[in-house]
Every structure is written in C-alpha cells, then in structure tokens.
Image (cartoon, rainbow, N blue to C red):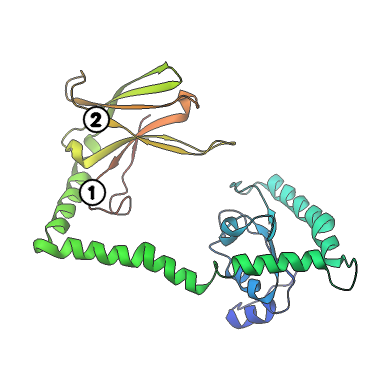
Amino acid sequence: MIFLSDYDMRLAQDLVAGIDLWINTPRRPWEACGTSGMKILANGGLNFSELDGWWAEAYDSGVGWAIGDRREHGEDLAWDATEAQEMYSILENEIIPMFYERSGGKTPSRWIARVRESMARLTPEFSASRTIRDYTVSYYLPAALSYKSRSEDGQRLAQSIVAWKMDIEKHWESLRFGRTTTEHHSGQRSFRIEVFVGSLSPDSIRVELYADAHDQTVGALHPMDRCGDCESSVGSLVYLSTISATRPVTDYTARIVPFHPGAVLPLEAPQFLWQR
C-alpha cells in the first residue's frame, strides 16, 4: 500500500495517464463523486470500482466491472471481506485473463473493444461540459426563475412563503394522527387515515404513504387525498388512498409533510411527522 499525500490535479494527471485499470473501493455511501475514475476514460483506462459515486450511475457490464450490490452495509467487517473476495475473484478470473489474452496477434482485442466502448459511451456523459449543463438546466435556471416569480408583484409570493414557513414552525407540534383503517379488495388496498391538523390550514400540509425499498422491492411514495364529506372524529380530517396490494400493509407508514406550491421542498421546510 502506498499513501499519496497532497493528492491534487497534477498528481492525478500523472497517475491517470498511465493506468489500464482504475480500482476505487470506498464504503458506500462515502464516495462523494470519484472524479479520478472519470479522468481515466479519455486516457483509455477501464474502471473496476464500488457501485458508489459516479460509478453507480455509469456502470454496466459493457464498459467496466463493479464491486458490491448497490446497498449500504455500514462498518460490517464481514461484508468488507465479502467484497474483497469478490474483487480478487473478478480480477483473477475475468480482468487479468482478458488483459493478457493475445489471440491472433499482439493486441488484446477484447480489452481494446471494451476500452473503445467505455470511451465512446462514458467520456461525453461524464465531463465538465455535462456538469455545467446539468447544473444550469436543473438548478441555476430554475433558481433564477424562482427568484423572478418571488420578486414580482411586490414580493407577494415571497411574503406568502415566509408567512407559511412561520406558521408551519409555530404550529407543527399541534399535528397528530388519529385512527387508521385498511381494506383489501380486488387486488387493491384502501387506506383511510384521520389527521388532527390543530391550528394549521389543511392546505399547508400533505399526507403521504411511504414504503422503504428492501430486497428486490423499490421504494414507494403515494400521496393521499383529503375527503371532504367523510365522517370523522371531532376536529380531524380524513385522508384516503387506494394502491395495488402487491406489498403487505406493514410495509407502509403514513407521514405528514409541509406543502406550499411556491416553496422548494423539503429544503425550505424540512419537517416530517411519521405515524407511530
């Protein structure tokens, strides 16, 4: 093991210029990005790294190799050992044989084919140009438009958001859940939840059903609709949602979140109230 102190762009340039295979093995989710792995693309190197940072987005089997299962395992030493064994196995059985394969001449044709695929597909997508484009389209322009809309008409929208935030902060503790009932019919599951909004306006919140991702199941988020004519306990409102019954009812938890059509959420109002 060699420790490189003061690792900077100049040292990175020297490294990536002469590397055939770049291996990066952080513990998920601690890789912020992995820009060095991007730099080797233009130099004809291939990546073999943990599915974290940029490689979680870029990887498929045609452009490199991967370590891990896209999940977080904390500081599990047994999982570290599992990933180490996986890394050595792929190196010994796939990567090294492919690099030294010289059938029909002196050129490792399968290796070069993968290098070309990596350069052609990944270099345009993982570059400073793409970064600037994504930030401009996804953040800078929307932020500029938001500032413009909040500044118009005597800052009416901005003042509305400030008043809403103050109301949320002042009265959030008055929210609470009431009774929850579920029904299962025709492959659908119906949820009925009572919510006591206290001093808050019902228009300033949203009620949602949330389910975590686990095993082979993706996460799910379902908004609930307020029922205006449902019978309920005194002082409560009723929220309804009907979803597919493909998951057990115990997977779902109701939650209340702030809502304002002009606010950036959850950045401007990070409160959550989970049903217990």
Q: Position of residue 250 (x, y in %)?
A: 47, 25
Label 1 crowd bin: few (<14), some (14–19), many (20+), radius 10 Å: few
163 sits to left or right of 140: left
- Residue at horizontal 58%, vertical 66%? 34
Q: Position of residue 11 (x, y in %)?
A: 64, 81
Q: If you read the primary sequence from the N terminus, does the residue marked by circle 2 or circle 1 appear first? A: 2
Residue in front for this viewpoint, 77 or 93: 93
Quadrant of the rendered image containing residue 121: bottom right
Q: Which mark is residue 226?
A: 2
- Residue at horizontal 75%, vertical 55%? 87
Residue in front for this viewpoint, 215 or 99: 99
Q: Amino acid at mark 1?
A: Pro
Residue at disc 1, secondary structure: loop
Q: Position of residue 16 (x, y in %)?
A: 67, 76
Q: Quadrant of the N terminus?
A: bottom right
Q: Which mark is residue 233?
A: none
- Residue at horizontal 40%, vertical 31%? 253
Q: Quadrant of the C terminus?
A: top left
Quadrant of the rendered image containing residue 193: top left
68 sits to left or right of 124: right
Please tell me whether residue 91 is drawn above or below residue 10 in the rendered image. Answer: above
Q: Kindly give the residue lying farthest to the front in the view shown.
A: 104
Residue linked to disc 1? 261
Residue at disc 2, secondary structure: strand
Q: Position of residue 52 (x, y in %)?
A: 59, 56
Q: Amino acid at mark 2?
A: Arg
262 sits to left or right of 113: left
Quadrant of the rendered image containing residue 267: bottom left
Residue in front for this viewpoint, 31 or 61: 61
Residue in front for this viewpoint, 74 or 93: 93
